[in-house]
Image: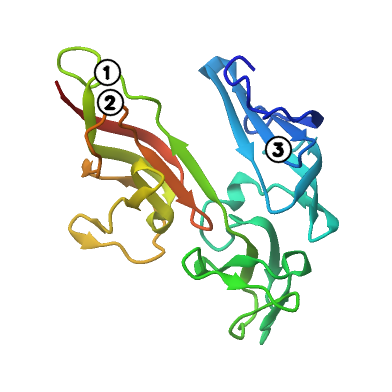
Amino acid sequence: MAMHEEICDGSPIVDLAVQRKPDTVVWFILANGEARALTYEPAENVIAWSRVVTDGLFKRVAAIRGAGQDSVYFAVVRNGAQRLERLAKLSECRGGTINCLADGFKRFTATAGQTTFSVPHLNGKQVTVWVNGVAVRDQSSLYTVASNQVVLSAMTGGESVIIGLPYTGKWQSTKLAYGAANGSALFHKKRVSQLGLGLIKTTLDGLRVGNSFTNLKRLTVTKGDKPIPAGHLFDDFDADMMSVSSDWDTDSRICLEARAPYPFTASSLVMDVKTNG
């Protein structure tokens, strides 16, 4: 825990499991109902902690060996009842018809004329709804579950419907100490004038960038001088460096926020850092 001595926030560890595929991840369950994930790939010099919280309480975790990806199961208490929930596989979180990017999700295959979908464990909660490759409800238009049900327009039959809680994935750069013409920019006032991102399997509707999590905006709404259609899934996104709103500060940083149910995967990130002094 030398990389983050306070990652457990003083709460005892009550359960753990080790996932080996596609990456080695050690899952920890804390007494306070939260979870922690340690991604460990020594061959690639990766030792990374993640906090995992939910609208409920994590109680137990188990990892079951699989051919392409291990199955990770959690015992979670939601709305006073304990449930067994499986972590979605990466292949189910890439956009398209089946896209399980929602917390505590439930997946349905609709029948002809079906309008109601039962999600009693999410009663009273605001949820996202994904239907056959389209975010019918995203974080700008959440659906409030009433009487244990979500009511949608009548289905023709065979549609894949995923309903679950919204969440965000956040990333913040370290303090920027590079990019200066005369050496380290560590104690100079600086700003990130431009940002370049290489993305795969990403829908830009859910991506926000900025110099803090309170000052975020969409990366772009155009590509090649043409508007990007709502909900468009990029298999590969590579564009020119783009302007980023960033004030002059000795601690200028870049923040990224990905909002479910839209998929987001970054393969590269490049910053143009300008210094003043």
On the image, the x and y values in percent for residue 249 come to: 26, 31
Mark 1 Cα shell of 10 Å, populated few (<14), some (14-19), many (≥20): some
Q: Quadrant of the N terminus?
A: top right
On the image, the x and y values in percent for residue 25 come to: 67, 29
Residue that appears at 22% across and 40% down: 241
Residue 220: image quadrant is bottom left
Residue that appears at 66% across and 87% down: 113
Residue that appears at 58% across and 84% down: 153
Q: Is residue 215 above or below residue 166?
A: above
On the image, the x and y values in percent for residue 89 come to: 65, 46
Instruction: Return the disc, 1 or 2, that comes first in the chain's sequence.
Output: 1
Say whether residue 174 is left or right of residue 226: right
Foreground of the two, 257 or 25 = 257
Residue denoted by label 3: 35
Say whether residue 257 is left or right of residue 183: right
On the image, the x and y values in percent for residue 80 come to: 83, 59
Residue type marked 1: Phe
Of labels 3 and 1, the one closer to you: 1
Residue denoted by label 1: 187
Instruction: Return the disc, 3 or 1, that comes first in the chain's sequence.
Output: 3
Mark 1 and mark 2: Cα distance apart in space = 6 Å
Q: Secondary structure at mark 3?
A: strand
- Disc 1 and disc 2 in contact, CB within 8 angstroms: yes
Number of numbered discs: 3
Of labels 2 and 3, the one closer to you: 2
